[in-house]
Image (cartoon, rainbow, N blue to C red):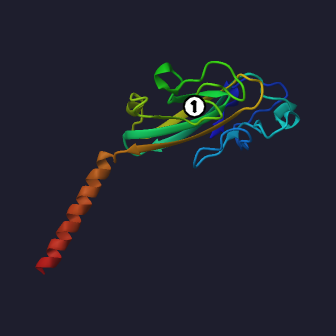
Amino acid sequence: MAFVPGSSTPDSGVVYTPGTVAVAPGLWHSPVPNSTWISFGQTGPTTPVGAQPGGHFAPNGDYFFTTTFTLNGQATAFTFSVLADDTTAVFLDGTGSGNTLMKAAPGGNVICQNALPNCLNVDTVTQADIPGALALLTPGTHTLTFDVQQIGSFDLGLDWDATVNTVPEPSTLFLLGTGLLGGAGAMYRKIRA
């Protein structure tokens, strides 16, 4: 997971780097399985304001994070879960409207965004919720982009997990088939001997 400083809201006195750090959830929901809360620095609810980057809370704005993954075949199903403070929009392979997996939540803010996605309730989507996403999940390398939106002037963080089911590539099926045929021929020869 990488932070994208050049696309994110500038913060005077803070030198951004592409690295991310683990953030303790504190009053946020515990991390989803197989993951951890992250940010560009210690910006979570267990970090006092003076110990946050620049000695203050991250200013309201957009903070971008990316990660890449590779699929060995066409996706047949997926599950994607996210938590964010305050909220996040999530995109697959570009930030156009046709690439949206999740929209940022509108509305008020108490601890984190009231509507989903937020930091208190895991927001999960599948291919049933976004059927067009399956067509985008082709064999090869893909990029997820998270636009974490700071709207409440306090803590900032992101947590997510995903699973993707794929069908094997045709070449993999062909090799498997020829391997089975070769094995059957060897067994036939052994039995006749």
- Pinpoint residue 43: horizontal percent, then vertical percent: 77, 35
Which quarter shows the N terminus? Answer: top right
Residue 167 location in percent, x, y?
34, 45
Residue 91, position in %: x, y?
53, 28
Secondary structure of the residue carrying tag 1 is strand
Q: Identify the residue position indicated by label 1 in the image.
A: 145
Query: Residue 110: in sight, yes or no?
Result: yes
Q: Quadrant of residue 192?
A: bottom left
- The residue positioned 58% from the left and 49% from the top of the image is 34
**Which one is nearer the viewer's eye here, 187 or 97?**
97
What percent of the width, then of the height, locates residue 69?
51, 42
Above or below 27: residue 108: above
Identity of the amino acid at label 1?
Answer: Thr
Identity of the residue drawn at 58% across and 38% down: 67
Is 20 on the left-hand or right-hand side of 76? right
Mark 1 surroundings: few (<14), some (14-19) or many (≥20) residues within 10 A: many
For image coordinates 26% across by 52% down, the residue present is 174
- In the displayed structure, does residue 164 sit left or right of residue 181? right
Q: Residue at x 86, y 38 (%)?
A: 51
Q: Which residue is most to the bottom?
A: 193
Q: Is residue 19 visible?
A: no
Quadrant location, the C terminus: bottom left
**Left/right of residue 171 with respect to residue 130 in the rendered view:** left
Horizontally, residue 14 falls left or right of residue 179, namely right
Please identify the quarter of the rendering in which residue 78 is found. top left
- Of 25 and 144, which appears nearest the observer? 25
